Image: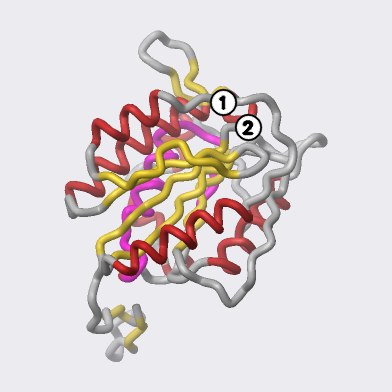
Amino acid sequence: METVDGTEGSGGGRYALKPMRINCEDILFCIDVDAESLVEMKTAGPSGRPLTRLECIKQAILFFINAKLSINPDHRFAFATLAKSASWLRKEFSSEVESTVAALRGLSATSSCGQADLTHLFRLAAHEAKKSRAQNRILRVILVYCRSSVRPHHQWPINQKLFTLDVMYLHDKPGPDNCPQAVYDALVDTLEHVSEYEGYIYETGQGLRVLLRHLSIMLSHPQQRCTQDDMDIKSLTKRSPVADSANGEDSVPISSQ
């Protein structure tokens, strides 16, 4: 997407899409299964018990997939987990919602995993991206990361950009025992290092509603995106910060600078 200068008095530029083929997506969700994925969020379930991050992630992924398929039923999805490294949860890409439900039902957290190495995830993604391209499709990885003090690392050549990377980062408030800002900065660097098209990264320490809001933005097709800095997030919600606070979802934002 490119910026076109606005006319005098228009209040700014406008965006225009360059003519190009828009490919269907193969989307690989990689979900962090470290023990921190069991931290409770500021959202209560039907029983009144607070939902864990992992429970909220499962609900958000189902929302995302149903919404994405309503836009184009030819998009497909697969699943991996991230402990110390990545491994397949469901390798076959499918557009069947029932298959997604079955995969998420088998998703569970592990004990504390320590360092997270993303190298194998990127190898899996690069391999699948080549198969997607052969079918005139593109591959996107959506990494859901939950560790508040562990920066992920990888060994990946900067000239191999075969897929798009989005990141959803769920974290604790900053404190003596964690450093979510440093983790966020490392995730930004990783995204910029590997992503073929414009990748988005969002973070929250709040509840399910905020997670859904961020994933709604990630519904956007990588080939049709503006840069994240040009996203006007405030225009996508009518709720004020006062209303958010009243719902018990206090925010401790992490700087994107």
Amino acid type, label 1 = Ala
Q: Is residue 204 magenta?
A: yes
Q: Secondary structure at mark 1?
A: loop
Residue sitting farthest toward the top:
47
Question: Where in the figure is residue 18, as x and y percent of width and height?
Answer: 27, 83
Between 150 and 175, the one lying in front of the other is: 150
Question: Where in the figure is residue 60, as x and y percent of width and height?
Answer: 38, 36
Q: Is residue 211 above or below residue 254?
A: above
Residue at (30, 78) in percent of width and height: 15
Quadrant (top left/top right/bottom left/bottom right) for the N terminus:
bottom left
218 relative position to 23: left or right:
right
Residue at (25, 49) in percent of width and height: 68
Between 108 and 208, the one lying in front of the other is: 108
Residue under circle 1? 109
Residue sitting farthest toward the right:
176
64 relative position to 129: left or right:
left
Residue at (65, 35) in percent of width and height: 172
Quadrant (top left/top right/bottom left/bottom right) for the C terminus:
bottom right
Dot label at residue 34: 2
For disc 2, the neighbor class at 10 Å (few under 14, some 14 to 19, many from 20) is many
For disc 1, the neighbor class at 10 Å (few under 14, some 14 to 19, many from 20) is some
What's the CA distance linking mark 1 and mark 2? 6 Å
Give, as a single range, the part of the protein colored magenta: 202-223
- Mark 1 touches mark 2? (CB < 8 Å): yes
Q: Is residue 89 magenta?
A: no
Question: Where in the figure is residue 107, as x and y percent of width and height?
Answer: 46, 27
Residue at (47, 63) in percent of width and height: 199
> Which of the two discs, 1 and 2, labels the residue nearer the N terminus?
2
